[in-house]
Amino acid sequence: MQEISVYQNLSKLSIRKSKVDFLLTELTQLLEASGVEITSLQLERQYEEWIDILLTVDSQDLKHLLPTLRRFGYEVMSKHKEDDLEDKLQEHASYLDKYLSI
């Protein structure tokens, strides 16, 4: 008999938030409301002003999760192919540069 893991496509996600604004309950409620399957959550590092959190989640959920985290003040430290924010910013910057050079 062959064993099949329920979680085959896991992604590690490193996020950062201000220490003053961080609430673990808020983060877990946000993840649950987004329908994200959390396999692990750990507080990675604490600095004077912020906290780094390491999440392991199902990679199918990243497309919607990353913008949601940013909307609630989390800074996404890790890079993911599902994250199109940097691509959009680059497009807008090149368009602005083209517009300003006219």
Image (tube, rainbow, N blue to C red):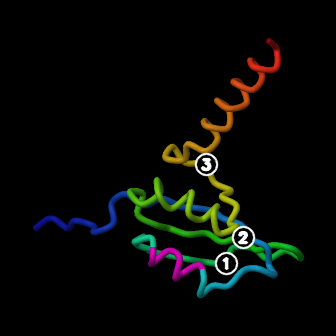
The image shows residue 23 at horizontal and vertical percentages of 68, 85
Residue at screen point 69% across, 73% down: 44
Of the numbered discs 3 and 2, the one sitting upstream in the chain is 2
Q: Quadrant of residue 9?
A: bottom left
Most common secondary structure along the magenta stretch: helix
Task: Determine which residue is flagged by label 1.
Answer: 43
Of the numbered discs 3 and 1, the one sitting upstream in the chain is 1
The image shows residue 24 at horizontal and vertical percentages of 63, 85
Marks 3/2: CA distance?
A: 15 Å
The image shows residue 55 at horizontal and vertical percentages of 55, 69
Task: Determine which residue is flagged by label 2.
Answer: 52
Marks 3/1: CA distance?
A: 19 Å
Marks 1/2: CA distance?
A: 6 Å
Residue lying furthest left in this view? 1
In the depicted view, which residue is nearer to us: 82 or 57? 82
Q: Which residues are magenta?
A: 27-33
Mark linked to residue 14: none
Mark linked to residue 79: 3
Residue type, label 1: Leu
Q: Is residue 11 left or right of residue 26?
A: left
Q: Quadrant of residue 17?
A: bottom right
Count of number-bearing discs: 3
Residue at screen point 40% across, 63% down: 58
Which secondary structure lies at badge 2?
Answer: strand
Answer whether labels 3 and 1 touch (C-beta < 8 Å): no
Q: Is residue 41 left or right of residue 10?
A: right
Residue type, label 3: Lys
The image shows residue 36 at horizontal and vertical percentages of 42, 70
Answer whether labels 3 and 2 touch (C-beta < 8 Å): no
Residue type, label 2: Asp
Q: Quadrant of residue 50?
A: bottom right
